[in-house]
Amino acid sequence: MTVHTILKMGDPRLLRVAEPVTTFDTDELHQLVSDLRDTMRAANGAGLAAPQIGVNLQLVIFGSHEQNPRYPDRPLVPPTVLLNPVILPLGSEEEEDWEGCLSVPGLRGLVPRWKHIRYQGFDVHGKPIDRMAEGFHARVVQHECDHLVGKLYPMRMRDLTSFGYTDVLFPGIGDADE
Ligand code: NI
């Protein structure tokens, strides 16, 4: 069980473009996935990207087995380890919803995302993943994959009047400190 420190906005390592994974199914990769899982669970996150713990690789994890206290009203997302992801929007429909990020603790913002996407990549063994997603699932994938190109959700916002502290925006919901 290794819980890493999650880098916070302002750290230049969150602004890098991550390197693709070239060798799958290695001990190092399995250890990284295990560390990301431990770190995400300890923080009650819905997803975590390797760059958030300072590892500059195209690897994200997301999803939840049970309801997440940070997102009590959100549908479940299949637990996934995704390497070298590519996202294709399906149609031009966008949707705005609230997001938080473990690298931006205590805050939430209203972020536009593609409503329907197809995403492709590989699992940790190198087996291809190819899925359609919509709504919250699609949002989580887009948010996590943004970490691989150095983007944090505030950079995707169009109106900063919809950016604020979680405990002020949503009193009584989730933990104020994320
Ligand atoms: Ni994030």
Image (cartoon, rainbow, N blue to C red):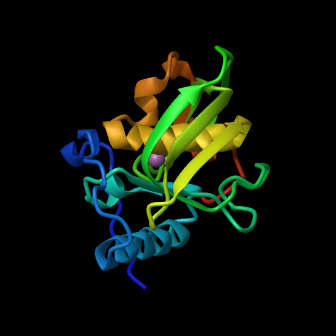
Q: Nearer the viewer, residue 60 or 75?
A: 60
Taking 109 as reference, is 106 above or below it? below
* Residue 7, percent from left and from top: 31, 55
Taking 136 as reference, is 81 above or below it? below
* Residue 117, percent from left and from top: 63, 31
Residue 96 found in image quarter: top right
Residue 98 found in image quarter: top right
Taking 128 as reference, is 2 above or below it? below
Q: Nearer the viewer, residue 26 or 30?
A: 26
In the drawing, does residue 70 fall left or right of residue 111?
Answer: right
**Residue in the image at 54% along x and 20% along y:** 161
**Residue in the image at 69% along x and 39% along y:** 133
* Residue 4, percent from left and from top: 34, 71
Image quadrant where one finds the C terminus: bottom right
Taking 65 as reference, is 132 above or below it? above
Image quadrant where one finds the N terminus: bottom left
**Residue in the image at 35% along x and 57% along y:** 50
The answer to whether any part of residue 90 appears in the image is yes
- Disc tally is 0
Q: Nearer the viewer, residue 116 or 21?
A: 21
The answer to whether any part of residue 178 appears in the image is no
Q: Residue farthest to the bottom?
A: 1
Q: Residue farthest to the left?
A: 12
